[in-house]
Image: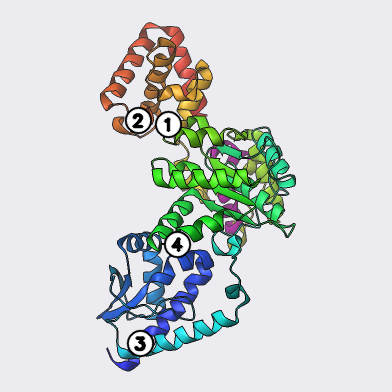
Amino acid sequence: MASADAASLHAAWLRICDRLKAEVGDVEYQSWIQRITLGPLDDDEITLYLPERFLRDWVRTQYGQRLQTLWREETPHVQHVELKIDKKAQRAPMSNGSHAPSSKSSHDIAAFAREDAAALDAEKETSPTAASPSVDVRNDLAVPLDRRFTFDNFVVGKPNEFAYACAGRVADQPASPGFNPLFLYGGVGLGKTHLMHAIGLKLMSRGNISVAYMSAEKFMYRFIASMQSKSQMEFKEQLRSVDVLMIDDLQFLIGKNSTQEEFFHTFNALVDAGRQIIVSADKSPSDLSGLEDRLRTRLGCGMVADIHATTFELRISILEAKAKASGTPVPPKVLEYLAHKITTNVRELEGALNRLIAHADLVGRPVTLESTQDVLKDMLKAHERRVTIDEIQRKVVEHFNIRLTDMSSARRARAVARPRQIAMYLAKQLTSRSLPEIGRKFGNRDHTTVMHAVNRVAELMEQDPGLAESVELLKHMLES
């Protein structure tokens, strides 16, 4: 590779790093992108190196496509990006936080790297944060909060009013008795994340409270990364120094035993120190099978607040508020149509409205019911039969007045077994899931068990008009 070509590639890589840093933020960049090393160019394929298989696989999954796009934009000659493992490559940090090219690159690139390393060292010596032994977790570890998600723009209705009130109490009086931890649970897109961000933003507005927010997935990967880089103590100290720790989508930790243990110890350390813990999940602590009992018990010892599926009235209120904020006139009949058609996910509901408003602005025509049906035909079609097994289970246990855990338990009492069979029957009728997939949602039962349940319920419906009526009623409620 010629000297000019090497310099050009290096300059392109620096620009790509700068763009990625702006896109993903300092935390993500330092955790993953910063550890990439620039390798050689072979025809139209550039090689990038990472020191470990774990990092290579994670970067490939999360950023592989974006890296390829950015390389094509910066250097059209580069059409493909190959990520490889190179444990022996020498890495010197650059001024933008990226890494120097590996020993497989030319001497010219190594010279650029030495200059950048010297510049970075100079910056560290003059930086006030570098001289301080303590690092604000909000900037170094946690994900930035979304300033759009405030209490003021959270639409309150009967399904979420209790969770909203609990969130408000914690925002006003963190770590108060009975509210630590605060555990929010409910389905996808119902407002759990919005409330968590609202709590964090209100607390941070005081100026003297440190808040760390991250998903359970991010918690796990950062914990693993700390082990890979042998910086576990730094990771622990950073997390346990915050005033408020918020973990979103805790169900992701199911089956991750070592990460669960680390979270459990972090949880205990913070609560014992009088710090606030806020957690969200798709189910209540008692229904999160796969979590360690000691962790499930600790999560349930504070305030547990559920967010129910939205009602028609709440969906209308949300749409009206969003339409008013946009400044684009949307007829009431269109809002009612959307509220009837998109019922399970507030995010998709808002996304549908945003799509309509954008279409109206771009083509210069008003929003009508006809244009709504045309613009959103793909989304509306996807919602025609979008019933989930979780919804079926919740509706069945509510109808028969049993516990949700009975859906996956080993109990064979008729009062439990019959509703479980009905739920399996409805799962087969109303979803596209296979028999093995349905079985896994019912306590990892074999597909033959599901087949027997489906056939048995079909037989009983022919023999027992009362049972048939109950099943049809459940089916109608789930489809409406």
Identify residue for label 4.
231
Secondary element type, mark 3: helix
The circle on residue 389 is 1
Secondary element type, mark 2: helix
Q: Position of 150 compared to 279: left or right?
A: right
- Which label lies toward us, 4 or 3? 4
Residue 436, how many percent across, how many down?
Answer: 29, 31
Foreground pick, 127 / 246: 127
- Residue 229's place in the image compared with 12, above or below, is above
| Pointer 4 or 1: first along the chain | 4
| Pointer 4 or 3: first along the chain | 3
Q: CA distance from mark 2 to mark 1?
A: 8 Å
Looking at the rendered structure, the kind of residue marked 3 is Ile
Q: Answer whether residue 353 is magenta in the image.
A: yes
Secondary element type, mark 4: loop
Looking at the rendered structure, the kind of residue marked 2 is Ile
The circle on residue 438 is 2
